[in-house]
Image (tube, rainbow, N blue to C red):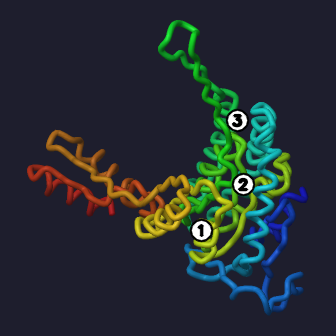
Amino acid sequence: MSNLLQPFIKGKSVHPTASVFANGLRNCTAMKSPSSSSSSHDSSILPPKQKLINPATARPHDYYYHPTPSPQLQYALHSAKEAQIAWGERSPPERAAILRRAAEIMSKNVDLLREMETLDTGRTIKETEYDVLEGVECLNYYAGVANSLGGHVYNLPGGRGANLAYALREPLGVTLGIGAWNYPLQSVLWKSAPALAFGNAMIFKPSEYTPSTALWMAHCYHEAGIPDGVFQVVLGGREVGAELVLSPEAAKVSFTGSLESGRNVYEMASKGMKKVTLELGGKSPLIIFDDANIDNAVSGAMMANWYSSGQVCSNGTRVFVHTSIMDQFVDGLVERT
């Protein structure tokens, strides 16, 4: 069995190994159970442990983790800042080649990743397999885009070629990714792939409820050739996220989550004038007109509301049906339900 998979498999079951992947070294703060061998950390100085729950059964997994303590967070931030300099100086083709290797590693571990994602989120294997395959596409896409963005030269007034302006695209530096619990694998890839492709370092904090695939990606990136410190995963809840966002070492924050949490992230980031990207919950209306096919309309409404148990940011939470077909629509929905 590949060393890459050892932390995540025991027998036929998949278990998340919770750790801080700091500076390329997996400093494990997870333990199988209270009766298992002790962690290398002094548990007296670790934050209280966080149990991982299988949402499909509401039962805890065998593993738990300690949120990343502040000294390790600071270590992660400083090592990311140092590592980013050399990573940003690498050529786009070099960075692209590493992302393609990461995509290749992912493509060889589809079954493992879909099972990990299902255990974390409670979603079906069919859905999570799609997420893995889309993740492979994401890495390959940004590997291709990395070579296409460079500097630009502009002609300015004053005669052709007399005055020129040159725009140079440079990495921001240390970027932060804060992921959501409904699509954790997509969160880590959609945030890390573009950041890494264009020469940035990233510290990623997955949801405290679904850390498994983000940790796996740290190992994947490391095996693919990402240098130590360039991509790191830290664990915990809002306290950990707040310390990261408020850090002067971070230049950019990408957050996926609720509207309320997004406001808090934006407010904290504004204190340091950081660039911010927010992907927040949406309210997507579904409008059904009187000439619609009733069966198709019912199918669309059911998928829009119940796909992934309804835990989707584009969930069709409002369904507007023309009054002339309301009874037919409701009858069809009740029958299908």
Q: Which residue is mark 3?
A: 143
- The numbered dot on residue 246 is 1
Q: Residue 41: x percent and y percent?
A: 85, 83
Crowd class of label 3 (few under 14; some 14 to 19; many from 20; radius 10 Å): many
- The numbered dot on residue 271 is none
Residues at discs 2 and 3 in contact (Cβ within 8 Å) = no
Mark 1 and mark 2: Cα distance apart in space: 38 Å
Residue flagged by tag 3: what amino acid is it? Ala
The answer to which of marks 3 and 1 sits earlier in the sequence is 3
Quadrant for the C terminus, please.
bottom left
Q: Nearer the viewer, residue 139 or 91?
A: 91
Q: Nearer the viewer, residue 244 or 50?
A: 244
Residues at discs 1 and 2 in contact (Cβ within 8 Å) = no
Whether 261 is drawn above or below 307: the answer is below
Q: Nearer the viewer, mark 1 or mark 2?
A: 1
Seen in the image, is 110 located left or right of residue 261? right
The answer to which of marks 1 and 2 sits earlier in the sequence is 2
> Residue furthest toward the top?
160
Say what secondary structure mark 2 lies in: helix
Residue flagged by tag 1: what amino acid is it? Leu
Q: Which residue is mark 2?
A: 111
Q: Is residue 15 visible?
A: no
Seen in the image, is 166 located left or right of residue 66? left
